[in-house]
Image: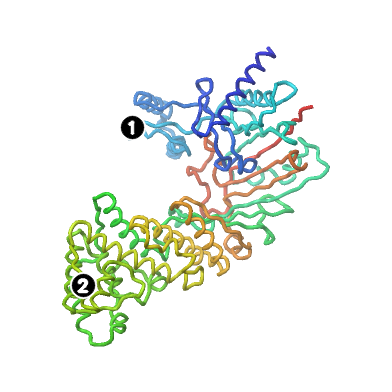
C-alpha cells in the first residue's frame, strides 16, 4: 500500500513539475476529471494574503462544456427541483428564484437557459477528502526522507478548491514548501473556511477567539497582530435603495498594528494605499463632454482603419454646411483685429454642454481651426458633409475672404493651408476619398491635445517635455489617436481624484507621474488599477462613518520561512467563487444603506510540518 501511495505521489509531482516548467498558463487535465492551472495568487481573493506575489497551482474539478440536450435536461430538472406548492409564500418563491440566479451568476461562466447559450460552468470544487489526497501526494513528493527529490527546485504552492461539505465548511486547502538554503525542510498547510452572511456580530469570532485559534495550532511565545480594511471611496452608489452601477472604483486599503477589537476603525497612523480604476464615460465626471468629443474622434479613426464609419447622432439640428457658412460669414463681418475676432466668436453651445465641464476644462483661446472642429464634430453625419464644409473654408481662404488666427504650433493640414493663405500661395487640395476625414481627424487631434496640455501643464502636474511621447505628430494618425486616448484616461483618473476625493496637489502630481510612466510603455487599459500611497488623514472623513467592504485581522508568530499566520476576514461579499452561500440577501453585495451591515466571514489557518 505504501509503495502504491508513493508511486502516485511521484506521478503527481512529475505532472506538476512539467506544468511548472511549461511557458503556457493553459489548464492541464489530470486523471480525466481534474483541472490544474498555473496562475498568479493575487487573482484569488481568499488566499492572496498568503500568495499574492507568487505563481501558484490551482486544482479544481474539470467541467465539460454544456450541450443543448444538457441544457434542456437541466431546465427540466430545475423546474422539478424548484416546484413551489400553492401554499408557499411569495417570499419563498423569490428566495428560490434568487438562489437560481446566484447559481448561474457565479464569477465563472454559467448557462443562460433563456437564450440557449453553450458555455462552460464556472470553477468547480473537489470534495474535501479528494483535496486532502492531492495535498498528501504533494507533501510526500517534497519530503526528502520519503522521495528522491534530486535537488530539483521546490514545487510552486498548490491550492485546491473544496466544496465546503465538511463540518468546518472548508473552501480551500493549500500547501507550500518551506526552504532553507534552497533545500526543502518542511511544508506549510493552509485551510480556508467560510460562513454565510450575518448581521449578528455576536456570532462572529472575537479578537480573542482568533488569538486562541493561533495559539492552539502553534503555541507561540509571542504574537504579532495586524489589522487591515478596505473602504469604497468612489464607484457604484446606492440611491433610494437602488444600486447605480459604475465601472469606475476608488478604494483604499489601510493597514495598522495594535488591533484592539473586531471591526475597529483604522487609526490615522495606518498606512493607506488608494486603488484607482477609472472607466471613461461616467456621466458624473467633469470629463464627460471631453469624452464625447474623443468618442467622435475615435469614430473617425476607426472609419479610416476599417473603411466603414458608424456616424454618431448629431448634437446640432442645423446641418454642418449651414453652420460652416454662418461661421465664415461671421468672420468676414468683423473689422477688428484677428485676435479680437477669435476671442469674441464664442463656441456654440449645445444642450448637452454642462456647467461643470465648461468651467473645469474649457479653453478660452480656441483658434479658427479648433472652433471649426467644434462645429463640425457636432453636426457632420457623412464624409460628404466633411468635404462640403472643408471646400467652403478652402475657397474662403483662396479668395482671401478670411485670414483667420491660428495657434503657432498647429500641425493639421488645414492649419498649413491657412499659413499659406497669408502669402497667397494656397496649394490645391483634392477633397476626395479619405482626405476630408483625414483632415478633420487631424483638426480634432490638434485641438484635444491642447485641451489636455491646458489642464496638465496649467495645473503644474507635468511639463511639455514629459508629455512629448503623447503629443508626437511624427507617428501615423492611428497611433496619435491611441496616445490621445491614453492621455484622456490619465486625465480621467486625475480629475476624478481631484473632484470627488479633493486630493491635494502633491498627491495629484505623484499620481500624474505614475500614470505617465505607465502609459509610455503599456497599452490603454481601463481595467488597470493604479496605486497611490497617501496619508489616511486626507480621506478619513470618507471612511470613518462608513462600513468597510473588507476588514481583517492577522495573528502571526515565528520568523522568516517559519513564520505562520492565522487570518480572520469579514467582507460584504463572498471571497470564493466556487460555492453558493446561505444568505437571506438576494444580491451578491449584501450591504446598502442599512445601519447594521451583513458580513461574510473567512478564516485562514496555517500549520507547519517540518521534515526531520
Tag nearer the camera, 1 or 2 = 2
Q: CA distance from mark 1 to mark 2?
A: 62 Å
- Examine the rendered structure and indicate whether residue 295 appears above or below residue 26: below
Which of the two residues, 573 or 428, is positioned nearer the viewer here?
428
Q: Is residue 243 visible?
A: no
Tell me, what colour scheme is on the image? rainbow
- Examine the rendered structure and indicate whether residue 279 appears above or below residue 83: below
Q: Residues within 10 Å of mark 2 (few under 14, many from 20)?
A: some
Q: Are marks 1 and 2 in contact (CB under 8 Å)?
A: no
Which of the two residues, 266 or 534, is positioned nearer the viewer here?
534
In the rendering, at what x and y percent does residue 494 appear? 49, 63
In the rendering, at what x and y percent does residue 178 appear? 71, 34
Q: Is residue 272 visible?
A: yes
Residue occupying the point 34% across, 55% down = 478
Residue occupying the point 40% across, 58% down = 483
Residue sticking out furthest to the right: 221
Relative side of 328 to 139, left or right: left
- Quadrant location of residue 289? bottom left
What residue sits right under mark 1 in the picture?
116
- Quadrant location of residue 352? bottom left
Residue occupying the point 56% across, 32% down = 58
In the rendering, at what x and y percent does residue 305 appear? 29, 51
In the rendering, at what x and y percent does residue 235 appear? 48, 56
Specify the quadrant that holds the N terminus. Answer: top right
Relative side of 90 to 139, left or right: left
Relative side of 271 to 113, left or right: right
Which of the two residues, 298 or 416, is positioned nearer the viewer here?
416
- Examine the rendered structure and indicate whether residue 563 appears above or below residue 170: below
Residue sticking out furthest to the top: 1
Earlier in the chain: of badge 1 and badge 2, it is 1
Specify the quadrant that holds the C terminus. Answer: top right
What residue sits right under mark 2 in the picture?
426
Amino acid at each position: 500500500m505504501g509503495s502504491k501511495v508513493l508511486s502516485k505521489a511521484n506521478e503527481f509531482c512529475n505532472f506538476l513539475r512539467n506544468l511548472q516548467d511549461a511557458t503556457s498558463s493553459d489548464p492541464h487535465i489530470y486523471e480525466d476529471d481534474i483541472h490544474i492551472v498555473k496562475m498568479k495568487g493575487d487573482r484569488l481573493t481568499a488566499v492572496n494574503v498568503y500568495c499574492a506575489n507568487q505563481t501558484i497551482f490551482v486544482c479544481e474539478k474539470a467541467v465539460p462544456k454544456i450541450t443543448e440536450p444538457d441544457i434542456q435536461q437541466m431546465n427540466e430538472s430545475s423546474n422539478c427541483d424548484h416546484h413551489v406548492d400553492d401554499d408557499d409564500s411569495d417570499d419563498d418563491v423569490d428566495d428560490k428564484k434568487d438562489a437560481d440566479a446566484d447559481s448561474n451568476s457565479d464569477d465563472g461562466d454559467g448557462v443562460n437557459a433563456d437564450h440557449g447559450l453553450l458555455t462552460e460552468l464556472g470553477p468547480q470544487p473537489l470534495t474535501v477528502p479528494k483535496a486532502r489526497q492531492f495535498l498528501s501526494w504533494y507533501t510526500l513528493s517534497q519530503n526528502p526522507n520519503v522521495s528522491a527529490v534530486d535537488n530539483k527546485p521546490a514545487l510552486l504552492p498548490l491550492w485546491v478548491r473544496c466544496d465546503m461539505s465538511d463540518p468546518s465548511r472548508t473552501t480551500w486547502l493549500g500547501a507550500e514548501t518551506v526552504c532553507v538554503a534552497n533545500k526543502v525542510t518542511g511544508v506549510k498547510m493552509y485551510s480556508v473556511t467560510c460562513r454565510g452572511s450575518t448581521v449578528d456580530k455576536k456570532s462572529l469570532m472575537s479578537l480573542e477567539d482568533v488569538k486562541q485559534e493561533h495559539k492552539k495550532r502553534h503555541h507561540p511565545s509571542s504574537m504579532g497582530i495586524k489589522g487591515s480594511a478596505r473602504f469604497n471611496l468612489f464607484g457604484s452608489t446606492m440611491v433610494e435603495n437602488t444600486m447605480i452601477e459604475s465601472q469606475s472604483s476608488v478604494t483604499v486599503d489601510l493597514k495598522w498594528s495594535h488591533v484592539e477589537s473586531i471591526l475597529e476603525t483604522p487609526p490615522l497612523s495606518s498606512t493607506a494605499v488608494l486603488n484607482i480604476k477609472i472607466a471613461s464615460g461616467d456621466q458624473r465626471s467633469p470629463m464627460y463632454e471631453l469624452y464625447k468629443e474623443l468618442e467622435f474622434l475615435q469614430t473617425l479613426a476607426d472609419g479610416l482603419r476599417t473603411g466603414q464609419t458608424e456616424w454618431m447622432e448629431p448634437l446640432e439640428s442645423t446641418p454642418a454646411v449651414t453652420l460652416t457658412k454662418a461661421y465664415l460669414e461671421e468672420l468676414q463681418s468683423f473689422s477688428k483685429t484677428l485676435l479680437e475676432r477669435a476671442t469674441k466668436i464664442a463656441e456654440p453651445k449645445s444642450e448637452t454642454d454642462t456647467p461643470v465641464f465648461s468651467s473645469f476644462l474649457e479653453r478660452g483661446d480656441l483658434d479658427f481651426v479648433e472652433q471649426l472642429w467644434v462645429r463640425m464634430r457636432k453636426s457632420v453625419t457623412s464624409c460628404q458633409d466633411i468635404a462640403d464644409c472643408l471646400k467652403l473654408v478652402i475657397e474662403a481662404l483662396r479668395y482671401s475672404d478670411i485670414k483667420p488666427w491660428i495657434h503657432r504650433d498647429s500641425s493639421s493640414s488645414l492649419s498649413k493651408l491657412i499659413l499659406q493663405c497669408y502669402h497667397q500661395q494656397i496649394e490645391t487640395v483634392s477633397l476626395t476619398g479619405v482626405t476630408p476625414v483625414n483632415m478633420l481627424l487631424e483638426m480634432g487631434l490638434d485641438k484635444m491635445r491642447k485641451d489636455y496640455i491646458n489642464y496638465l501643464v496649467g495645473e503644474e502636474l507635468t511639463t511639455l517635455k514629459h508629455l512629448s511621447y503623447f503629443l508626437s505628430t511624427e507617428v501615423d494618425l492611428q497611433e496619435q489617436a491611441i496616445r490621445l486616448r491614453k492621455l484622456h484616461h490619465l486625465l480621467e483618473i486625475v480629475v476624478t481624484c481631484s473632484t470627488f476625493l479633493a486630493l491635494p496637489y502633491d498627491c495629484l502630481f505623484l499620481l500624474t507621474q505614475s500614470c505617465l510612466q505607465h502609459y509610455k510603455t503599456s497599452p490603454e487599459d481601463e481595467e488597470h488599477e493604479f496605486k497611490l500611497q497617501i496619508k489616511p488623514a486626507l480621506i478619513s472623513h470618507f471612511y470613518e462613518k462608513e462600513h468597510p467592504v473588507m476588514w481583517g485581522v492577522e495573528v502571526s508568530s515565528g520568523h522568516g520561512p517559519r513564520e505562520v499566520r492565522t487570518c480572520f476576514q469579514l467582507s460584504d461579499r463572498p471571497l470564493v467563487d466556487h460555492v453558493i452561500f446561505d444568505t437571506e440577501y438576494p444580491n451578491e453585495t449584501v450591504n446598502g444603506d442599512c445601519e447594521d451591515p451583513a458580513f461574510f466571514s473567512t478564516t485562514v489557518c496555517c500549520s507547519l510540518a517540518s521534515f526531520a
